[in-house]
Amino acid sequence: MKILKNELIYLATALMFFTRIPVPFTIPYSSEIMNKSQKYFAWIGLLVGLINAVILYFSAQLFNLEIGIVLMMITSVLLTGAFHEDGFTDMCDSFGGGYGKEKILTIMKDSRVGAYGTIGIILLFALKFLSIQALGNIDLLKTLGIVILAHSSSRFISGTMIYTHQYVTDIDVSKSKPLANKPLDGIALLVGLISVLISFALIPDGRLILAFALAYAGKICMGWYFKKHIGGYTGDCLGSVQQVSEVLFYLGTIIAWKFI
């Protein structure tokens, strides 16, 4: 019983950390709890993706596909408080306007959004909209499953950065400061992977493995770039990997459906 209670605390912590969804009870907080909650990050993506898919389906029926996508994107931002999008804009500003590790990290800590961040998020949203639109025009029902899968997979992929790269910024100022601690063992990865497998079960299409591979390849490339310029990752880097991985999953699905 105690084990189940602890797991619920870890799940609720992940929910509070990554979304604006209220938790109807008080939960304890510590760095240890935050670290152990990382196993459920992909599950939060599964939940967010499911809500987004519902919004997309009913909005598309009431209006049209394009309006449905916009309303879905608005819902996603409201659900998460633009948590990952904020990380993406900070990443664009810091790497676009900074030279050298110290300058990059200094810009990254600045809460203001500059030209690089503004341009980057506009292009990212445009690519996300157009890719989902292309998928929806092919098969709306399957696209709903793709949305769920993209959200869970991208969060799982982003979480793997904690295991494969070094944390480099000051713990006291990072949005993901508890995650800078020593990561959990393979059980955490397995728990996160289960949510991805459940998402795959919603739309059993072997071609989507290509989409997942492309999304993970994007993480590898971004990880290489981060390591080259700052020696590892920051909380903002994790958010940017999630956003880019999500879009790459949509693009990978288009490629798979078009050529395979």
Image (cartoon, grey):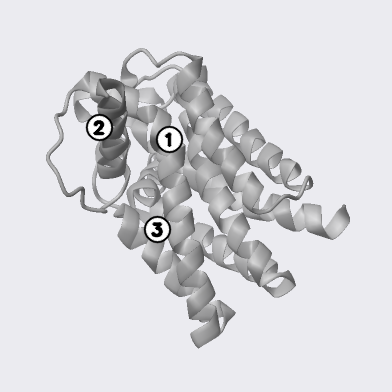
The residue sitting at the right extreme is: 260
Q: Nearer the viewer, mark 1 or mark 3?
A: 1
Pointer 3 or 2: first along the chain: 2
Residue 127 visible somewhere in the drawing: yes
Residue type highlighted by circle 3:
Thr
In the image, residue 155 sits, relative to residue 128, either above or below, namely: above
Q: CA distance from mark 1 to mark 2?
A: 23 Å
Q: Position of residue 208 (x, y in %)?
A: 73, 47
Q: CA distance from mark 1 to mark 3?
A: 18 Å
Residue type highlighted by circle 2:
Ile
Badge 3: residue crowd in 10 Å (few <14, some 14–19, many ≥20):
some
At numbered mark 2, what does the secondary structure look like: helix, strand or loop?
A: helix
Q: Quadrant of the N terminus?
A: top left
Q: Nearer the viewer, mark 3 or mark 2?
A: 2
Q: Position of residue 127 (x, y in %)?
A: 58, 61
Residue marked by disc 2: 9
The residue sitting at the front extreme is: 1
Q: Quadrant of residue 15?
A: top left
Residue marked by disc 3: 118
In the image, residue 223 sits, relative to residue 195, either above or below, namely: above
Rendered image: mark on residue 179: none
At numbered mark 3, what does the secondary structure look like: helix, strand or loop?
A: helix
> What residue is shown at x 30% (from left), y 49% (from top)?
19
Residue marked by disc 1: 238
Q: Position of residue 113 (x, y in %)?
A: 31, 53
Q: Position of residue 210 (x, y in %)?
A: 75, 42
At numbered mark 1, what does the secondary structure look like: helix, strand or loop?
A: helix
Q: Quadrant of residue 35?
A: top left
Badge 2: residue crowd in 10 Å (few <14, some 14–19, many ≥20):
many
User: How many discs mark residues in the rendered view?
Assistant: 3
Disc 1, disc 2: CB below 8 Å?
Answer: no
